[in-house]
Image: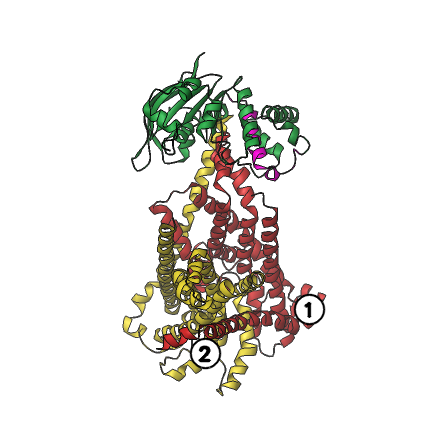
Amino acid sequence: MVTRFLARHRYTVQRIGFAVITLTAIFTVLPIIGTIIYIFVKGISAISVEFLTGFPSNGMREGGIYPAIVGTFYLTIGTAIFSVPLGIAAAVYLSEYASNNKWTRLIRLAIVNLAGIPSVVYGLFGLGLFVLFLQFGTSILAAALTLSIMTLPVVISTAEEALRAVPQPFRTVSISLGATRWQTIRRIVLKEALPGILTGVILGLERAAGETAPILFTGAAFFLPQLPQSPFDATMALPYHLFVISTQVPEMPIQIQYGTALVLLVFVLTMNIIATVIRSRARAKRQW
Amino acid sequence: MVDKITIENLSLQYADGTESLRDVSMGIRQNAVTVLFGPAGGGKSTLLRCLNRLNDLTEIKASQGRILIDGENILDLKTDVIALRRKVGMVFARPVTLPMSIRENLTYALELAGIKRKSKLDEAVERSLKLAAIWDEVKDRLDEPAIALSGGQQQRVCLARVIALQPEIILLDEPTSGLDPISTGKVEAALQELKKEYTIILVPHSVQQAARAADYAAFFLTGELIEYSEGKEMFTAPKQKKTEDYIMGRFG
Amino acid sequence: MEKSLSWREFIITRLIQGSGYSAILFVALIFFFLLREGLPTLREVDISSLLNVRWYPIESYYGILPLITGTLIVTIGATLIAVPFGIGTAVYISEVAPRWMREILKPIVELLGGLPSVVLGFLGILVMVPYIRLFMNLPTGLTAFTGSLLLGAIAVPTVVTVAEDALDSVPRAYREGAWALGATRWQTIWRVTLPAAKSGVLTGVMLGVGRAIGETMAVMMVTGNAPVMSLRLNSLFSPARTMTATIAAEMGEVANGSTHYHVLFFIGMMLFIISMIVNIIASSVLFRSKKRAERILS
């Protein structure tokens, strides 16, 4: 009976339904934009050259966040060094070499698993393996390695997708002209997939830059009097810094908190924008 | 007139065991256009891909037989497949230009073969494009993306790409299937010129094309070679009933 | 020259193969280390006290039940928020919005997925917590409810991205068939498109749930960190502690090799196993539906 009523008034139902759905979308999207604008507005007054290039003082309540910025930078580069070559190579294997057998399915299962492990569990793993067992200590090296394994599944998935998107006929033609498989991959497939791979890498690194839990016990320090001198030193980092100053420092000026949040946000957003730009420009220039 | 290629008792199977070619034996004459024709599924393309070992990439295995090119069995495990593919070139059904400029499409394989000097590359580019009957149309835009050309032009560039390697045998698998009649005519005319230097094996996309182009013709039906004779004979007075039925369009 | 070429090719191929298998190596490594440091718990703490309701490590109370219920409550709450908003937004983007809006909305939702959780937690403390305290008239705004809200927001982008992909992949023919039979677009969405994308949407939800379970920082910053076990309805509005927050909060102060240390690893191991189960189910559902779709559409 209800269904008959609904059916008879189906256009009204549709109008209401669409309205509800649209509202849902609005309530999802608007807060996102609002959040970003809010942080900008609240934090912009803290931004100054001294803030960005100076060291903190008075227990973080004054001064700048330069070491945290540098630390996040180092960690991101370290993550890139370990996860990018390995991830792309693994993606090449899955896309170009692997046949569809039990082992390949196991690899894919492993990747799915790696992608789902909670970030704090990665922190524990990093502590157990890199800090303690391999005795790297609380260091950039340990933190970067931990972040790398965490970033690996993202790099592999997006790189594989980019490689698969390259049309199969290119490979067939290349082989028929006397190229070996690797020559084909290097000269054609990888070259054409590069923008897509780059986009995925940047998005993965963006996530690594913003993570706190994996570096909590593996490399992050709250206060260091100087910049890290070697990969075996611990480092300050933006996400960890924000966490501590917003939860554990009494009488912390709100300005600095918002300013730190803003800097981290800008760091992340910039990477996001770069990735998006690479993606759309590559799509326009594509010769297939 | 000598046989460039000799196929002896060739049988092929798919990965699941179904047969693709059954006991095919034939000789391919040098410097002539040999046409392999017949209804779809007859094994013609598969046979073509054996000749440059492209089937290595697929799940098709030769269960028995040999293919001799210049007296050497190319199905042997010790065969230098790279050198074979430079000797036996292939043009595919859909024009597949590599995502590069026209010039780079042609020099791609040459550089892989070790030819790096610019003068030699330029000379090869011009020679091949002329033989493919497309030099005049593209000589002023060699560095533009090949994808910008029309379908017929792209296919002729693909032909030039193969010629640039100076092969001895050229395989063509329905090369004009998507092309307009004018482009088709240009390709067919180019083949008649090319056969003076090269051995051409063509899978046509219609019986009419087969009749126009063939010096020799082989009729394939579900993996078996039914009839093989000179072109003129085949299309005016075929000996087998099945051949005649197909040519007359009674099935297909 | 050909000889050295094939040597190089061989080495490169082997390296690439090794890289592919490295994923398996890493999962095994992680599992091994969690086990190594977590299993001693079973020797040092007996099961009955693990299953206790008091978590007070300073006095050697290692009851993990309040942590589990904390995670449970917050995750369920997050799911109740993420599912309607996530699926609704996915439906909007895929079926209702005009084309140009889609190109704007998708990146914005993706953006949320990329925002660091510590930033969201930070805003949670400064903005959400006071508001909730005010509006719900509570002694403190640091509650499981606040955590659920924030977590729901964090899980939404995952749900939206995967569900929208699934809806987008439903062949046009399905919709056109329904329209041809006189259905309205609304009816088509609910009776044809959504059911067809069912497994993809379900996968999105499960991945979102997985994200919620594994979230650490944001949750830690807004739920109040009180490992209290209570299953009454209004416990939603009092502070709680999740498994992830426990590890993050206490690991820094723990002596290497102590019982507390082992128990934290034990909790980490549990999290690993839970997320593994969720992800295996999610991906096998997706895998099976892809195979079915391929069969139907071929």
Q: Colour of chain C?
A: yellow
- The answer to whether residue C255 is visible is no
* Tag 2: amino acid: Phe
Instruction: Give the residue pinned by disc 2.
Output: C145
Q: Is residue C208 magenta?
A: no
The local secondary structure at tag 2 comes to helix
Q: Where, quadrant-wise, is the C terminus of chain A in this rendering?
A: top right
Viewer-proximal residue among A52 and A273: A273
What is the number of callouts on the image?
2
> Seen in the image, is A101 located left or right of residue A175?
left
Determine the CA span between mark 1 and mark 2.
Answer: 34 Å
In reply to whether residue B149 is colored magenta, the answer given is yes
Residue that badge 1 annotates? A47
Q: Main secondary structure of the magenta part?
A: helix
Query: What colour has chain B?
Result: green
Image coordinates for residue B113, horizontal then vertical, percent: 54, 27
Q: Residue at x 53, y 53 (%)?
A: A200
From the viewer's side, name the closer residue of B62 and B149: B149
Query: Residue B7: which quarter of the image?
Result: top left
On the image, the x and y values in percent for residue C276 come to 37, 60
Query: Which range of residues does the magenta coloring cover?
Result: B141-167
Q: Which mark is residue C195?
A: none
Residue C48: quarter of image: bottom left
Q: Vertical placement of C229 versus B249: above or below?
A: below
- What's the residue type where badge 1 is placed? Ile
Of all chains, the one bearing label 2 is C
- Say if B195 sits above or below A283 in the image: above
Picture coordinates of residue B216 (x, y %)? 43, 19
State which chain is coloured red: A
Check the image and name the residue furthest to the right.
Answer: A49
